[in-house]
Image (cartoon, rainbow, N blue to C red):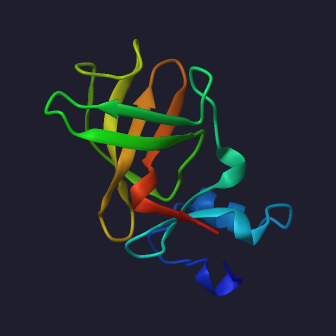
Amino acid sequence: MTDAHVKESDTLDPRLKDRLKESNRPKEGYVFCLACSHVLAHAQDRLNIDGSHKHVFSNPHGFMHHFGCYQEALGCAIEGPAVAADSWFPGYLWRLAMCADCGQHIGWLFEHDDHFYGLLLDKIQTG
């Protein structure tokens, strides 16, 4: 990815704008929305949960979800109430994470005493 792919729009969280300006973060390390190229996170925010960055789970309707875990995904908008039912991570509540630019469902925010994001691997691209 080139610097031109780093899209700074009015919808970016101010903390993410600051991260985009940090010189110690390589531009090629950003995680983008596949639908609109909005910056969602950075590869340096990758996180291992239960021993792995990548996870595969099915929801109660039988749909399989492949996602990667990130400590922060400031380019996401969080929607809906926190839900305990059907959480893939015991003790964690989940909320929907949407692309803050195009509104595409991009994953989930998992919250407990801490938090992390699960970003759907088929909805993101990395630079």
Q: Residue furthest right?
A: 24
Q: Quadrant of residue 25?
A: bottom right
What is the quadrant of the N terminus in the image? bottom right
Q: Nearer the viewer, residue 98 or 126?
A: 126
Q: Nearer the viewer, residue 46 or 52?
A: 52
Residue 7 placement (x, y as % from top left): 55, 78
Q: Residue at x 45, y 43 (%)?
A: 67
Judge left or right: residue 84 versus residue 15.
left
Q: Name the residue nearer the viewer: 78 or 92.
A: 92
Residue 88: x and y in percent read 36, 23
Left/right placement of residue 3 relative to residue 37 reads right
Q: List x then y, in percent, for residue 123.
A: 40, 60
Q: Is residue 87 above or below residue 105?
A: above
Residue 74 to residue 96: above or below: below
The residue lying at 53 percent from left, 50 percent from top is 73
- Asked whether, in this view, residue 5 is left or right of residue 101, the answer is right
- Name the quadrant of the C terminus: bottom right
